[in-house]
Amino acid sequence: MEKEENQNSTSTDHNQDTIKENEKSAENLVEENKQKIDQEPKEEIKDPTPEEKIAELEDKVARTFAEMENQRRRFEKEKEDAFEYGGYSFAKEALNLIDNLDRSKHVLESDDKLKETDALKKTLEHLDIIKKDLISIFEKNNIKPIDSLNKKLDPNFHQAMMEIEDDTKEPGTIIQEIQKGFTIKDRLLRPSLVGVSKKVTKSEAKTEENQETQENK
């Protein structure tokens, strides 16, 4: 038992000695690294020269003036847009007057009791005069109708609502105007709603030929 205790104490002392040696070697390495770092030449931090300071200030001032100029231009553009297009919403709503006049005219023309009467003719004449006056007022304020009939479909100004078979026109030609479109200066107020032409399909063309042949018989 005593021998085992002596052996254990001896191994413990040996381990402690090993730990102390490792600690010393680690301390020596740290010290050596410190000495190496101290011996390395240090880069000197130079203060900027007066010329460099002036150049830096000039750059900052130039950037500030550029930002101020950009802001001024942006404000000017917003002010111009407010002046030029401030009545955009009002103009768009006012177009309903023209639409209502057209609807009223269509209703009156479709009334069998009023057809071919002087009252109808006079009423339609007055409606046409009111519509022309409205369009004239719009044009004075740079609100102009879009020409559509017999024009090629332009997605920037027209919206196709239907296709109508017509071999006498090139496909994509506007042959019916459902609702007139308008522009305000260089902006679209609303697109024209239109019907465009398309070629007659072969099956339908044959059907028409057969009908004509039967009628001739």
Image: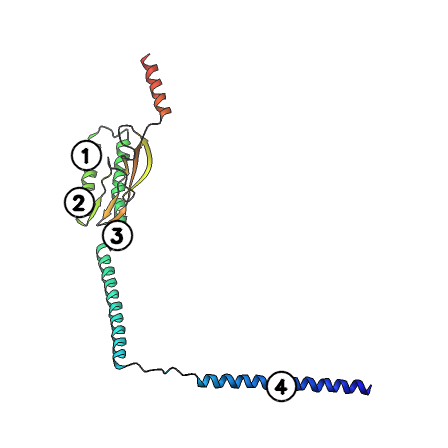
Number of residues whose C-alpha sits closer than 10 Å to that of mark 2, classed few (under 14), some (14–19) or many (20 or more): some
Quadrant of the rendered structure where residue 214 is?
top left
**Under tag 2, what secondary structure?**
helix
Amino acid under disc 3: Tyr
Report the Cα–Cα distance between label 2 and label 1: 21 Å
Q: Quick one: quadrant of the C terminus? A: top left
Between disc 3 and disc 1, the foreground one is 3
* Residue shown at the point (25%, 36%) measured from the top left: 105
**Under tag 4, what secondary structure?**
helix
- Of residues 112 and 162, the one nearer the viewer is 162
- Mark closer to the chain start, 3 or 4: 4
- Of residues 196 and 39, the one nearer the viewer is 39
* Residue shown at the point (52%, 86%) measured from the top left: 31
Any mark on residue 21, and which? 4
* Residue shown at the point (71%, 85%) measured from the top left: 12
Amino acid under disc 4: Glu
Q: Name the residue under label 3.
A: 88
| Image coords of residue 51 (percent x, y) | 25, 79
On screen, residue 97 above or below 23: above
Q: Name the residue under label 1.
A: 122
| Image coords of residue 1 (percent x, y) | 82, 85
Report the Cα–Cα distance between label 4 and label 1: 121 Å
Report the Cα–Cα distance between label 2 and label 4: 106 Å
Amino acid under disc 2: Ser
- Of residues 166 and 30, the one nearer the viewer is 30
Report the Cα–Cα distance between label 2 and label 3: 17 Å
- Verify CB contact (< 8 Å) between mark 3 and mark 4: no
Any mark on residue 136, and which? 2
Report the Cα–Cα distance between label 3 and label 4: 90 Å
- Mark closer to the chain start, 2 or 3: 3
Quadrant of the rendered structure where residue 13 is?
bottom right
**Under tag 3, what secondary structure?**
helix
